[in-house]
Image (cartoon, rainbow, N blue to C red):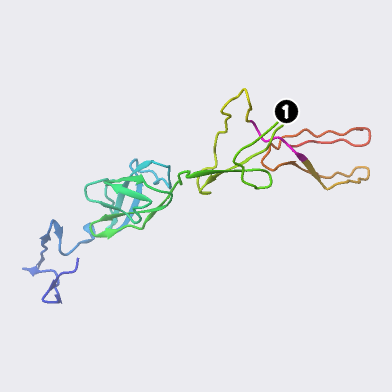
């Protein structure tokens, strides 16, 4: 801390060849290497690297470790001796050393020790699902489905916003009327096609099940194994 008197910077007081100091609000006016913070590391409370993700409605506790000009380090600081701040309280808030999720985005957290502020810790806050869109294979929105006995229809489901987790569980309201399962394959593409090989030659075929979101498991076979053989890889 620099000390000024009438606008003039004051040096440390010297009396009888001994350098003196003074306290203001519990802090030394003329900091020494032993109490001058040069670096702050934000960690988990167990001393391991701080988490970089925050789930919806989740919380995480942090700790800070300060490094001083003389090289020594502080103990892990959680509440006393450290001040925490969130740079965007719409994404996450701080209560003591606890980060609390508020909205999807990037939370930036800082720790301040002895007047020194750390670099911001970046935490990716998950996005909460806000709505669901359902469409057919052509991408046309679907609000209702009418099927005859034995018929099926593939539906694409998207969770909005797109940054939110796309995991979902589909179910039928009445299993005696209709059931929900994996997308039904509507076609297969093979590339290249056709294939002409000489004796001893090999080639690789790319097989895709349509639609692309249908299960891609398949079994490959060849009708006349006296002509060629096949090594199937899913």
Residue beneath the point at 84% across and 36% down: 230
Point out the residue furthest to the left here.
16
Work out whether residue 69 or residue 193 is closer to the camera in this orientation and state it: 193
Which residues are the magenta region? 181-187
> Where, by quadrant of the figure, is residue 142 drawn?
top right
Residue beneath the point at 70% across and 37% down: 216
Horizontal arrangement in the rendering, residue 144 relative to residue 92 (left or right): right
Horizontal arrangement in the rendering, residue 112 relative to residue 27 (left or right): right
Work out whether residue 234 or residue 153 is closer to the camera in this orientation and state it: 153
What is the magenta segment's predominant secondary structure?
loop
Work out whether residue 201 or residue 133 is closer to the camera in this orientation and state it: 133
Number of on-image labels: 1
- Residue 84, given in percent of the width and then of the height, sits at 28, 52
Horizontal arrangement in the rendering, residue 168 relative to residue 21 (left or right): right
Report the quarter where the N terminus lies. Answer: bottom left
**Residue 25 in view:** yes
Residue beneath the point at 65% across and 33% down: 182
Horizontal arrangement in the rendering, residue 19 relative to residue 106 (left or right): left
Residue beneath the point at 54% across and 37% down: 168
Q: Residues within 10 Å of mark 1 (few under 14, many from 20)?
A: few
Report the quarter where the C terminus lies. Answer: top right
Report the residue marked by disc 1: 150
Q: Is residue 79 magenta?
A: no
Work out whether residue 121 or residue 142 is closer to the camera in this orientation and state it: 142
Q: SS of the residue at dot 1?
A: loop
């Amino acid at each position: 801390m620099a000390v000024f008197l009438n606008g003039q910077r004051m040096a440390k007081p010297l009396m009888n060849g001994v350098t003196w100091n003074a306290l203001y609000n519990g802090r030394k006016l003329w900091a020494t290497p032993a109490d001058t913070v040069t670096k702050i590391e934000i960690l988990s409370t167990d001393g391991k690297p701080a988490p970089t993700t925050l789930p919806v409605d989740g919380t995480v506790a942090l700790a800070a470790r300060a490094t001083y000009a003389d090289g020594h380090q502080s103990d892990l600081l959680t509440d006393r001796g450290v001040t925490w701040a969130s740079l965007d309280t719409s994404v996450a808030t701080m209560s003591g050393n606890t980060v609390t999720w508020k909205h999807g985005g990037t939370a930036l957290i800082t720790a301040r020790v002895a007047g020194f502020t750390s670099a911001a810790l970046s935490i990716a806050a998950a996005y909460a699902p806000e709505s669901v869109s359902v469409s057919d294979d052509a991408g046309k929105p679907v609000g209702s489905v009418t099927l005859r006995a034995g018929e099926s229809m593939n539906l694409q489901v998207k969770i909005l916003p797109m940054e939110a987790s796309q995991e979902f569980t589909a179910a039928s309201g009445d299993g005696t009327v209709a059931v929900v399962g994996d997308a039904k394959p509507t076609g297969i593409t093979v590339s290249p096609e056709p294939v002409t090989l000489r004796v001893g030659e090999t080639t690789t075929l790319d097989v895709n099940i349509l639609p692309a979101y249908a299960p891609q498991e398949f079994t490959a076979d060849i009708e006349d194994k006296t002509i060629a053989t096949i090594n199937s890889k899913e």
